[in-house]
Image: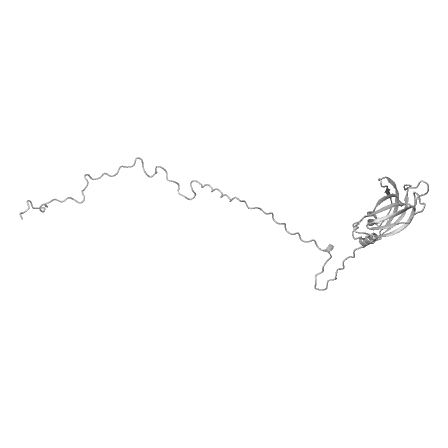
């Protein structure tokens, strides 16, 4: 349980008594009393005359709590009339259990100035605000009232009756682009010979006979071009010798 927000709230302390105190008197019985110290506040019980080692007090005190202070100091003294009072023992009382559970009834050890055990003191702590806070936390939470839908309006169902939401389609995994350019696919080899083309001509050509036939014989000697003329020209044919001019 949370014990914050205790500033100024009352804490009830009952000093029941002490047990097995160191005896500071040699002849008579000692007269103990108890002092409570909390913050700057100090409280004192009445002196238990002739209380000896097991005095009884049954005194009640109400302390206003201080936020952040969870410890109470107690000091037991032996009262004297003519001389200063004599220190018997002191102790520290933890308030955590009382503040968290509302009640604590226990005996706490006392120590002398040298740290030696010097007896016990019984205190009853009562913190009523812890019970009120516990009841407030355990109070049932009223169920919310849902308004009846009017005609022409869609009915709003309570959260436990609503259909589960449609799952959102998962986001496709992101594929990082490759920093390298795609390498072109190698060309497909062509069939040989290519489809639809004429077959290659054989070598040597099949249409020629081997050896080839000789060229046609030429007229020898060949006719000159143009035909030669003679000078002076000869007499006309049929008369020889030609007549004089």
Q: Nearer the viewer, residue 177 or 16?
A: 16
Outermost residue toward the top? 211
Please indicate whether residue 60 sits to the left or right of residue 6 in the image: right
Q: Nearer the viewer, residue 33 or 155?
A: 33
Outermost residue toward the left? 244
Residue 159 horizontal/vertical position (percent):
73, 55
Please indicate whether residue 183 sits to the left or right of residue 224 in the image: right
Please indicate whether residue 65 sits to the left or right of residue 239 in the image: right
Please indicate whether residue 46 sits to the left or right of residue 194 in the image: right
Residue located 85% across and 46% down the image: 74
Total tally of numbered discs in the picture: 0
Check the image and report above or below for 8 versus 27: below
Residue 193 horizontal/vertical position (percent):
42, 40
Residue 152 horizontal/vertical position (percent):
70, 64
Q: Quadrant of residue 144?
A: bottom right
Residue 143 horizontal/vertical position (percent):
77, 57
Q: Nearer the viewer, residue 237 or 176?
A: 176
Q: Nearer the viewer, residue 76 or 236?
A: 76
């Amino acid at each position: 349980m949370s014990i914050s927000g205790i500033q100024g709230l009352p804490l009830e302390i009952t000093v029941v008594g002490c047990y097995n105190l160191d005896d500071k008197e040699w002849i008579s019985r000692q007269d103990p009393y108890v002092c409570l110290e909390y913050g700057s506040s100090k409280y004192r019980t009445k002196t238990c005359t002739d209380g000896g080692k097991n005095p009884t007090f049954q005194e009640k005190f109400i302390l206003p709590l201080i936020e952040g202070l969870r410890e109470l100091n107690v000091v037991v003294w032996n009262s004297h009339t003519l001389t200063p009072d004599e220190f018997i023992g002191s102790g520290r009382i933890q308030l955590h259990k009382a503040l968290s559970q509302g009640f604590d009834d226990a005996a706490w050890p006392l120590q002398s100035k040298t740290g030696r055990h010097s007896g016990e003191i019984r205190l009853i702590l009562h913190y009523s605000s812890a019970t009120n806070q516990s009841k407030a936390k355990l109070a049932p939470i009223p169920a919310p009232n849902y308004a009846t839908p009017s005609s022409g309006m869609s009915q709003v169902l309570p959260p436990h009756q609503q259909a589960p939401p449609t799952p959102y389609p998962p986001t496709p995994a992101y594929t990082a682009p490759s920093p390298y350019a795609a390498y072109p696919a190698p060309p497909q080899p062509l069939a040989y010979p290519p489809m639809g083309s004429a077959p290659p001509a054989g070598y040597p050509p099949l249409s020629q006979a081997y050896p080839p036939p000789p060229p046609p014989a030429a007229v020898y000697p060949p006719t000159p071009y143009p035909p030669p003329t003679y000078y002076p020209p000869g007499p006309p044919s049929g008369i020889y010798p030609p007549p004089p001019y």
